[in-house]
Image: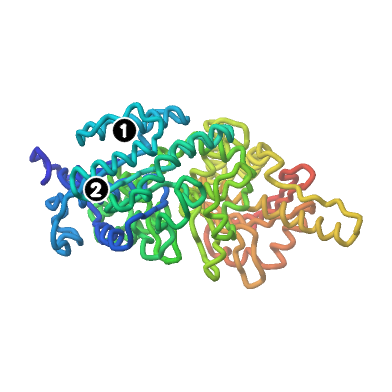
């Protein structure tokens, strides 16, 4: 194993497998490999028909490739892995591996042609009759499975990767076109279970939870391990795996950014960690982004730049999207696993990795939130320009200007930047709640709820904007006298902010004084401002502000 050439570079001591999802190539090429064969053994012991849902570029394809090499009996590739000494006899099986991401079209006809071509190639490979005249894709697939079983005398291993690729790419199509795609896939995907006596092992992976789609012949056909605690880190990199396998990368990255070792670990954690897919509290890093960071020696939004789909963005832009749900959302498990609907973007956001599990209550209610800095930046960078109706360049320009003005202490200017950003957000993202009622008391309760809703919405918008431009920001900061709405800190300035809705800046500043919000910063050395900001529910924007040096 290893490279064909004896090239060595001091600044390249480790070869990171960026974009490499072939276990065979990874092992032969001398790439760094984080051993996940323990999970391979669990899968084989667990059952015959397995399903796994994880976001794109999280290692599903590599896991299927590892399974393929195992069932082909390629013992030499597993030298030094967890599973190697535990295999009594290495056996070789026929493996049918379908990567649905390789389809070259996104409608029912092109999918049907792609699958028929794939089956024809396999028929030729196993020297079986070419069934090109078959009008039934399912029959053709089942005949292939049975034919291989009878010819070899061994059961067949079937692996299907990115099974939902066709579904995701037709999200914005008509219901008729979506159903036509489902009909093609349904006839194909149901065959492995129907041919169970001919199948040794079958695993299907994808982004969407297959239980939401009638592509398989029943809910009990495949064991869905997606949310099983024992498979929490089957994909992704745990903190222990990071520290055990990437010390050289951490060292190089720390040096490149003039940061301490522990400081860099924390930076990586904040940027790429905190994905949680199961009841287990174990968190994982985005593996693709980690590998890119160590390869390019920089912290960037790697996964987002390669993984976000235009269909995904277009779909979300048509959904009823609530900015408040980006930070703290309690949902049922059923909603997390639901079929994608244009009126509800939550299942899509969770299953594609833009939301993750933050907390669980009684194994029934799940609190979802944004996992890390990379995803937070992406959601806003990619989606906010769409909602605002401006280009990404225009949005980036506004953010850059705000960042500079905050750093320089240009108080009036950064408030104008905030006003400009908020003014471009469509009104429907703020509500409103219906306040019409003949009952005066009920009407007042609705009005009070509206006020709370609007104020919280503005608060979250400003918090998210400041997070995007990477300034030190805290919301709901507790003091002995109460809680300040927001504190923003730069290397030269501290802004203690109080928000009010349909009120006055004097009232906001008075609360800062009365509650003693400035006291903790008097000895800080930086210039401190108390800031009163008033929003108008009618104007749907910031209507007044006042800065006073503390």
- Residue 307 in the image, given as x and y percentages of width and height: 42, 40
> On the rendered image, what quadrant is the C terminus found in?
bottom right
Secondary structure at badge 2 equals helix
Horizontal side, residue 536 vs residue 306: left or right: right
Is any part of residue 295 visible from this angle? yes
Closer to the eye: label 2 or 1: 1
Check disc 1 and report the residue beneath it: 118
- Residue 82 in the image, given as x and y percentages of width and height: 20, 62
Rendered position, 329 above or below 184 = below
Horizontal side, residue 203 vs residue 125: left or right: right
Q: Residue furthest bottom?
A: 480
- Residue 86 in the image, given as x and y percentages of width and height: 17, 64
Q: How busy is the neighbourhood of tag 2: few (under 14 within 10 Å), some, or many (20 plus)?
A: many
Residue 112 or 292: which is nearer the viewer? 112
Cα distance between the residues tagged 2 and 1: 17 Å
Asked if the residue under mark 1 is in contact with the one under mark 2, i.e. CB atoms within 8 Å, the reply is: no
Residue 97 or 518: which is nearer the viewer? 97
Residue drawn at point x = 62 percent, y = 36 percent = 388
Q: Earlier in the sequence, mark 2 or mark 1?
A: 2
Secondary structure at badge 1 equals helix
Residue 68: mark:
2
Is any part of residue 18 visible from this angle? no
Residue 536 or 48: which is nearer the viewer? 48
Residue drawn at point x = 30 percent, y = 45 percent = 297
Q: How busy is the neighbourhood of tag 1: few (under 14 within 10 Å), some, or many (20 plus)?
A: few
């Amino acid at each position: 194993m290893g490279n064909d050439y004896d090239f060595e570079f001091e600044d390249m001591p480790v070869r990171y497998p960026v974009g490499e999802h072939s276990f065979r190539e990874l092992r032969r090429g001398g790439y760094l490999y984080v051993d996940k064969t323990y999970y391979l053994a669990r899968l084989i012991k667990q059952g015959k028909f397995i399903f796994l849902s994880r976001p794109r570029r999280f290692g599903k394809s590599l896991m299927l490739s590892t399974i393929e090499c195992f069932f082909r009996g390629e013992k030499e590739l597993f030298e030094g892995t967890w599973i190697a000494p535990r295999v009594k006899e290495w056996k070789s099986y026929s493996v049918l591996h379908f990567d649905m991401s390789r389809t070259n079209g996104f409608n029912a006809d092109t999918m049907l042609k792609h699958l028929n071509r794939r089956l024809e190639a396999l028929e030729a490979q196993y020297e079986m009759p070419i069934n090109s005249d078959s009008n039934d894709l399912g029959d053709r697939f089942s005949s292939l499975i049975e034919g291989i079983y009878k010819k070899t005398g061994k059961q067949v291993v079937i692996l299907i990767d990115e099974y939902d690729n066709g579904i995701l790419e037709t999200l914005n199509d008509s219901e008729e076109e979506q159903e036509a795609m489902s009909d093609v896939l349904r006839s194909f995907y149901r065959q492995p279970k129907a041919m169970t006596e001919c199948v040794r092992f079958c695993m299907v992976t994808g982004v969407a939870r297959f239980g939401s789609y009638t592509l398989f012949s029943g809910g009990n056909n495949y064991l869905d391990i997606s949310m099983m605690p024992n498979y929490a880190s089957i994909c992704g990199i745990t903190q222990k795996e990071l520290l055990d396998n990437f010390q050289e990368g951490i060292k190089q990255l720390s040096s490149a950014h003039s940061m301490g070792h522990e400081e860099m670990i924390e930076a990586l954690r904040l940027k790429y960690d905190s994905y949680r897919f199961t009841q287990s509290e174990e968190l994982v890093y985005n593996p693709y982004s980690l590998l890119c960071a160590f390869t390019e020696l920089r912290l960037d939004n790697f996964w987002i730049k390669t993984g976000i789909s235009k269909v995904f963005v277009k779909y979300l832009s048509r959904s009823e999207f609530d900015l408040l749900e980006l930070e703290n959302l309690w949902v049922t498990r059923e909603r997390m696993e639901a079929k994608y609907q244009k009126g509800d973007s939550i299942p899509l956001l969770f299953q594609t990795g833009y939301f993750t599990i933050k907390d669980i209550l009684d194994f029934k209610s799940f609190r979802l939130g944004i996992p890390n800095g990379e995803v937070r930046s992406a959601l806003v960078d990619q989606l906010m320009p769409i909602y605002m109706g401006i280009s990404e360049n225009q949005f980036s320009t506004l953010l850059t200007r705000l960042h500079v003005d905050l750093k320089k202490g240009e108080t009036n200017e950064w408030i104008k930047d905030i006003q400009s950003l908020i003014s471009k957000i469509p009104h429907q993202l703020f509500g409103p709640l219906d306040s019409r009622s003949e009952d005066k008391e009920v009407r007042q309760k609705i009005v009070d709820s509206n006020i709370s809703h609007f104020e919280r919405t503005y608060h979250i918008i400003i918090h998210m904007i400041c997070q995007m431009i990477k300034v030190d920001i805290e919301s709901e900061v507790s003091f002995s006298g109460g809680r300040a709405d927001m504190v923003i800190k730069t290397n030269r300035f501290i802004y203690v902010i109080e928000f009010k809705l349909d009120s006055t800046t004097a009232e906001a500043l008075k609360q800062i004084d009365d509650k003693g919000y400035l006291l903790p910063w008097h000895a800080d050395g930086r210039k401190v401002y108390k800031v009163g900001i008033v929003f108008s529910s009618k104007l749907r924007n910031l209507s007044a502000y006042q800065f006073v040096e503390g």
